[in-house]
Image (spheres, rainbow, N blue to C red):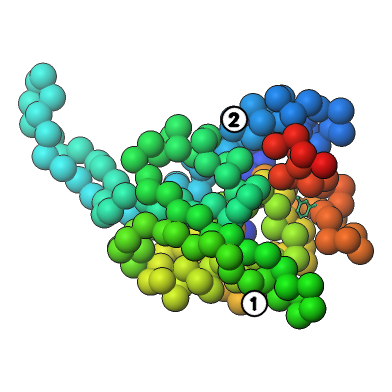
Amino acid sequence: MIDHLTVVDHPLVQHKLTLMREKDTSTKSFRQLLREISLLLAYEVTRSLPMTTVRIETPLCEMDAPQIDGKKLALISILRAGNGLLDGILELVPAARVGFVGLYRDPETLKPVQYYFKVPAELEDRVTIVVDPMLATGNSSVAAIDLLKKAGAKDIRFLCLLAAPEGIARMKEAHPDVPIVTASVDDHLNDHGYIVPGLGDAGDRMFGTK
Ligand code: URA
């Protein structure tokens, strides 16, 4: 188990994040940087995967060599912005199984409501990595993890690009067993639920919508 919160302060991650925050960075560059940075964050979130050994034969002799234990990872994207993190992570973990959780906010209750849920089988036997670039209020992340736990997931980790202190606190309260890996903890949330200083709307910036 890794710590509850890991901030990846690697110079490459921090440099790429600065470029992504810049308001004039193009959609094309933003997407490319997101792919690169998600690969680097995936390196950190997979650091503590369970290991075993396997007997192999090198050209010189036999040895017990390390390999990742258990079933293939489950990578779960919270729609739609989570999809921007998938390509980079899959480059590093190409055999991972992939699932999707879609949630919208009910305008009256303001609570997240599920509109899509499709996840890999046997979640209980897989390390499950939930991805969403922005941990803002934490409402959708908490709701998505509630659903994944109901579906059987036990070893869950959360990967995001930016986190607000409010979202971290909400996650820690609701799911203290789920470690968070992020590139930055920003200052605060504004009245519209945006992370400040942040990078704006991650979905709009990666997909070129407004
Ligand atoms: N979602 C975003 O895309 N950006 C924020 O700042 C907060 C939530």
> Is residue 109 shown to the viewer in this render?
yes
Type of amino acid at the residue the image marks with label 2: Glu
Quadrant of the frame with the N terminus: bottom left
Residue found at x 58% / y 44%: 83
Q: Can you give x and y, in whole percent of width and height, for residue 43 in the image? A: 49, 40
Q: What residue is shown with label 2?
A: 36
Spatial CA distance of label 1 from label 2 is: 31 Å
Question: Which residue extends farthest right?
Answer: 191
Which amino acid type corresponds to the residue marked 1 in the rendered image?
Glu
Left or right of 115? Residue 122 is left
From the viewer's perspective, is 14 left or right of 82?
A: right
Depth check, mark 1 against mark 2: the one in front is 2
In-front residue for pair 204/89: 204
Res. 142 image quadrant: bottom right
Quarter-of-image position of residue 135: bottom right
Seen at 34% across and 67% down, the residue is: 124
N-terminal of the pair, mark 1 or mark 2, is: 2
* Residue position marked by numbered label 1 in the rendering: 173
Percent position (x, y) of residue 202? 74, 44
| Image location (x, y in percent) of residue 2 | 49, 58
Label 2: which secondary element: helix
Q: Is mark 2 within 8 Å of ligand 1?
A: no
Do we see residue 4 in this rendering? no
Image mark for residue 73: none
* The C terminus: image quadrant: top right
* Residue 183 position in % (x across, y down): 67, 45
In this rendering, the count of numbered labels is 2
At mark 1, the secondary structure is helix
Q: Residue at x 50, y 71 (%)?
A: 147
